[in-house]
Amino acid sequence: VNGKIVIPVVVNVLYNTNAENISDTQIQSQIDVLNQDFTASNSDFNKIPDEFALVAANVDITFELVNIIRKSTSKKSWGTRDAMKKSKQGGIDPTSPATTLNLWSCNIGGGILGYAQFPGGAAATDGVVIDSDYFGLSSTSSYPYNLGRTASHEVGHWMNLRHIWGDASCGNDLVADTPIAKTANFGVPNYPYISTCGTDNHAEMTMNYMDYTDDRGMYMFTNGQKSRMSALFVSGGVRSGFRN
Ligand code: ARG
Ligand code: ZN
Ligand code: CA
């Protein structure tokens, strides 16, 4: 154990069309985005407003692509019930989920960008699904979700992060240094976007990866979110299998 958290990643590609058979370059671009976003080396990190800069985190977790598995399929869309993770249902079973982050790229359908399994769920379905249109740095046709931030958001869930608004009106995301948010934000709200929760007026942290803003509008995790994520990887933690 050297303290460094490096996450081995296997990418499972299910394709019905040539476009869904995303290239190795496309896949590597997603790994690069994850590495940037989780080490505060994303090029837009300097956009963080001063009032949030103090709590902005270098999560200090990195990702390493170890394998790409491809499978042609007659299925045109996969939905969100984990069929893509099961060979018996035409999908691809995860590789060593206790020690590997499995990503699936496929056509989810229904306008869903991606979805994740929280820590503590079944090993057989552990991992993150990203629609192939939004996997990695993608073409302008995928705008405004073309910068690979769907995976940054979903891997946040996979590492135990809740939505910043706590999935309720002015809800609780169990993180102390993210300000209370009224609801999900979309687009790229102008800073300061003031919300009212009770009598407290404050700027929302719409640039957090765990909001629903456009890819170009999200560029930070906080120290509190980092603590929540890091706790999974300590000895005895839910994802302790990932320690090097
Ligand atoms: N709607 C998805 C979820 O709830 C992902 C949203 C990702 N947002 C983005 N800008 N790519 O998990
Ligand atoms: Zn989410
Ligand atoms: Ca909070």
Image: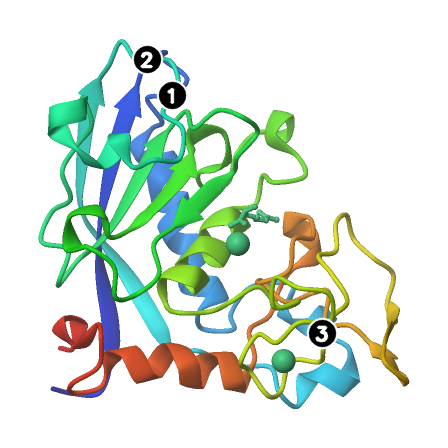
Q: CA distance from mark 3 to mark 2?
A: 40 Å
Left or right: residue 82 versus residue 42 is left
| Residue under label 1 | 20
Q: CA distance from mark 3 to mark 1?
A: 34 Å
Image location (x, y in percent) of residue 228 = 41, 81
Q: Within the image, what quadrant is residue 90 found in?
A: top left
| Residue under label 2 | 16
Q: Residue at x 30, y 19 (%)?
A: 15
The tag earlier along the polypeptide, 3 or 1, is 1
Q: How many marks?
A: 3
Mark 1 element type: loop
Q: Is residue 58 visible?
A: no
Q: Give the residue type that dot 3 points to.
A: Ile
Q: Are marks 2 and 1 in contact (CB under 8 Å)?
A: yes
Q: Give the residue type that dot 1 points to.
A: Glu
Image location (x, y in percent) of residue 136 = 45, 41
Q: Residue at x 77, y 67 (%)?
A: 182
Left or right: residue 31 versus residue 207 is left
Q: Residues within 10 Å of mark 2 (few under 14, many from 20)?
A: some
Quadrant that contains the C terminus: bottom left
| Residue under label 3 | 48
Left or right: residue 41 versus residue 244 is right
